[in-house]
Image: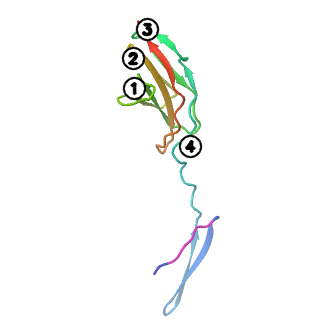
């Protein structure tokens, strides 16, 4: 048999009875639905800390990218590209569980970088602003 249901705002006890030769009853606890996971983009954008805008680095110099922690983030994606539109293929498209990333293998060119947070369910937050830097002889 079909038992119609509807959402409840609080946990509710419901008695179900069936009649055939005898009466049988049972009580069910109907629980309210848990909140849905936050929609994609609900994590705030990280704030870029370093390197500063238009920073310059020597070839093969270690460049450390640092940004603010985002509440609810389980990991971050950093993108580095030679175009401010971040079109494929990207120079770097790296996931990290910390709010820092370092590389000494960047090409000798002008580049931009940005970061976004990812929650434990894999939902991506909003991209940070992008920042320009340069590796130059």
* Residue bearing the label numbered 3: 58
Label 3 and label 1: CA atoms lie apart by 18 Å
Asked whether the residues under the numbered discs 1 and 4 touch, taking CB atoms below 8 Å apart as contact, a structural biologist would say no
Overall secondary structure of the magenta stretch?
A: loop
- State the mark number for residue 106: 2
Horizontal and vertical percent for residue 48? 56, 25
Label 3 and label 4: CA atoms lie apart by 37 Å
Residue at the outermost left position: 89
Q: Looking at the picture, tell me which residue is in the foreground, 9 or 52.
A: 52
User: Mark 1 Cα within 10 Å, few/some/many (few <14, many 20+)?
Assistant: some
Asked whether the residues under the numbered discs 1 and 2 touch, taking CB atoms below 8 Å apart as contact, a structural biologist would say yes
Residue 29 falls within the magenta-colored stretch = no
* Residue bearing the label numbered 4: 42
Asked whether the residues under the numbered discs 3 and 2 touch, taking CB atoms below 8 Å apart as contact, a structural biologist would say no
Q: Secondary structure at mark 3?
A: loop
Residue 20 lies, with reference to residue 42, above or below; the image says below
User: For the magenta stretch, what is the residue range?
Assistant: 3-8
- Choose the circle earlier in sequence order: 1 or 2: 1
Residue at the outermost right position: 10
* Residue bearing the label numbered 1: 92
The structure residue drawn at horizontal position 42% and vertical position 24%, both measured from the top left corner, is: 83
Colour scheme employed for the rendering of this structure: rainbow
- Choose the circle earlier in sequence order: 3 or 1: 3
The structure residue drawn at horizontal position 48% and vertical position 11%, both measured from the top left corner, is: 56
Rendering quarter of residue 62: top left
Label 3 and label 2: CA atoms lie apart by 10 Å
Horizontal and vertical percent for residue 66? 53, 23
Q: Secondary structure at mark 1?
A: strand
Q: Where's the C terminus, which quadrant? A: top left
Q: Looking at the picture, tell me which residue is in the foreground, 32 or 64.
A: 64
């Amino acid at each position: 048999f079909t038992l119609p249901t509807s959402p409840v705002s609080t946990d509710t006890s419901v008695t179900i009875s069936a009649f055939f030769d005898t009466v049988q009853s049972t009580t069910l606890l109907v629980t309210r639905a848990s909140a849905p996971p936050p929609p994609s983009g609900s994590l705030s954008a990280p704030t870029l800390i370093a390197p500063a805008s238009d920073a310059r680095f020597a070839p093969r110099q270690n460049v450390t990218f640092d940004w603010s922690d985002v509440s609810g983030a389980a990991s971050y994606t950093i993108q580095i590209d030679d175009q401010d539109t971040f079109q494929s293929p990207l120079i770097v498209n790296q996931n990290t569980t910390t709010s820092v990333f370092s590389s000494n293998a960047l090409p000798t060119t002008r580049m931009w970088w940005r970061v976004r947070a990812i929650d434990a369910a894999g939902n991506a937050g909003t991209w940070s602003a992008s920042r320009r830097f340069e590796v130059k002889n």
